[in-house]
């Protein structure tokens, strides 16, 4: 039904014209060509499973953190910055007797792991919200997270920290084998939230190969980056890639993890995770926490698989003793990998999400489904 004198964009009469498909596909292709593909996945496997997993368990933790504004400080790079006059603005939490101490984070996570293991099994992946690794005692935190990853055979992304030497926002990845520990860098600074950090010279779509499948890790605003999202869709779209690439085993990306500290509305974040998971045919989990002087503390986890809500098998809130507030909300998601594999193998038209025009646009070319070089 037309609104405001226009044509309803969902009606057949409003189908895209050939020149419109040409224009949009050119825009999409230039967008994802601005993002590099890292090449082969970064190898984080520590063992070979006897048989493929049927269920994947992902634990998401949203922690109430100290107010970042109280702990943000400006740092200048060494030497005169001719083209970047503003110093970087970094957050490093320090013990002040009022906020949450860093020891509470790994202690709470281990309590939840034990409960999950008793009822189901240890989570295969653990995710904390952005800035959760941003305490001054980072060396001590690294030891604790590495020990937990090894003890429970899990991959832990304990949020992010601001590197005070190189000025990046970094998300560490702790593996069951500490020799394989790695990291991801935030590729988009949240300027509207006052974040001034260094970002990589080139944006890349990086895939990590783990014991439990291929993983992508984005940090907060990265999930809204059209170039990254289009590159991701072009990669996960089974119509893309040359014949050799299509024939590779284990090519599929099963999981995307997103640590966030975002003031965007909960509905917007949820819909973004839902939509990207649907069109990429992947499972996505986002852990978000946010608080300021005007906003009550938000502790959120969002999980979707192919656009459908992930099954929540365990949920727990952790209160602060003698205070009427929650400092952590933990959620354990169950992902049916057999169902996800079947879903990923289906032709796109079977589930009604890829019209011929859409496929042509994502592939970067109109009318025919063809290989597109990076």
Image: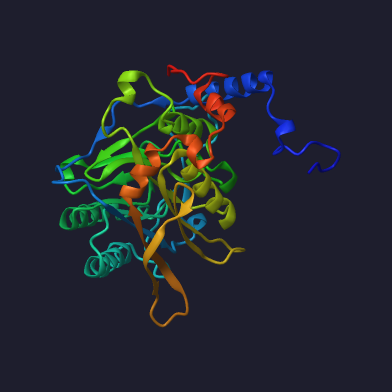
Residue 117: quarter of image: bottom left
Query: Residue 78: in sight, yes or no?
Result: no
Q: How many marks?
A: 0
Q: How is the image coloured?
A: rainbow
- Horizontal relation, residue 120 to residue 340: left or right: left
Classify 319 as above or below 291: below
Q: Residue at x 38, y 26 (%)?
A: 37
In terms of depth relative to the viewer, which is nearer, 228 or 321?
228
Residue 292: quarter of image: bottom right
Q: Residue furthest bottom?
A: 322
In terms of depth relative to the viewer, which is nearer, 83 or 156?
156
Classify 203 as above or below 306: above
Classify 95 as above or below 162: below
In terms of depth relative to the viewer, which is nearer, 180 or 201?
180
Residue 225 is situated, as x and y percent measured from the top left of the image, at 52, 36
Residue 265 is situated, as x and y percent measured from the top left of the image, at 59, 55
In terms of depth relative to the viewer, which is nearer, 68 or 146?
146
Residue 105 is situated, as x and y percent measured from the top left of the image, at 32, 63
Q: Residue at x 59, y 27 (%)?
A: 357
**Quadrant including the N terminus:** top right
Classify 83 as above or below 373: below
């Amino acid at each position: 039904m037309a609104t405001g004198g226009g044509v309803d964009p969902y009606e057949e009469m409003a189908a895209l014209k050939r020149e419109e498909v040409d224009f949009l596909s050119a825009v999409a292709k230039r967008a994802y060509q601005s993002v590099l593909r890292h090449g082969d996945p970064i190898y984080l496997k520590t063992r070979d499973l006897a048989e493929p997993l049927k269920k994947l368990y992902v634990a998401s933790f949203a922690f109430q953190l100290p107010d970042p504004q109280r702990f943000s400080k400006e740092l200048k790079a060494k030497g005169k910055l001719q083209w970047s006059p503003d110093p970087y603005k970094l957050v490093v939490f320090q013990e002040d007797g009022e906020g949450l101490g860093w020891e509470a984070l790994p202690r709470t996570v281990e309590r939840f792991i034990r409960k999950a293991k008793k009822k189901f099994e240890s989570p295969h992946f653990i995710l904390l919200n952005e800035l959760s690794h941003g305490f001054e005692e980072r060396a001590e935190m690294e030891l604790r997270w590495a020990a937990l990853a090894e003890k429970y055979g899990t991959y832990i992304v304990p949020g992010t920290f601001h590197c005070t030497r190189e000025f990046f926002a970094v998300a560490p990845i702790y593996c069951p084998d500490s020799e394989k520990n790695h990291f991801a860098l935030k590729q988009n600074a949240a300027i509207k939230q006052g974040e001034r950090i260094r970002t990589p010279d080139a944006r890349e779509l990086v895939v990590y190969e783990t014991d439990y499948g291929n993983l992508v890790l984005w940090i907060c605003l990265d999930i809204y980056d059209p170039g990254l999202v289009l590159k991701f869709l072009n990669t996960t779209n089974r119509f893309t890639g040359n014949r050799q690439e299509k024939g590779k085993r284990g090519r599929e990306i099963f999981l995307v993890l997103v640590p966030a500290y975002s003031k965007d509305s909960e509905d917007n974040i949820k819909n973004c995770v839902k939509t990207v998971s649907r069109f990429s045919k992947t499972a996505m989990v986002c852990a978000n926490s946010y608080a300021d002087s005007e906003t009550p503390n938000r502790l959120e986890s969002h999980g979707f698989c192919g656009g459908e809500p992930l099954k929540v098998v365990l949920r727990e809130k952790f209160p602060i003793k003698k205070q009427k507030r929650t400092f952590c909300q933990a959620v354990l998601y169950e992902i049916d990998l057999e169902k996800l594999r079947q879903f990923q193998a289906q032709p796109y038209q079977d589930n009604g999400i890829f019209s011929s025009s859409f496929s042509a646009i994502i592939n970067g070319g109109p009318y025919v489904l063809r290989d597109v070089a990076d």
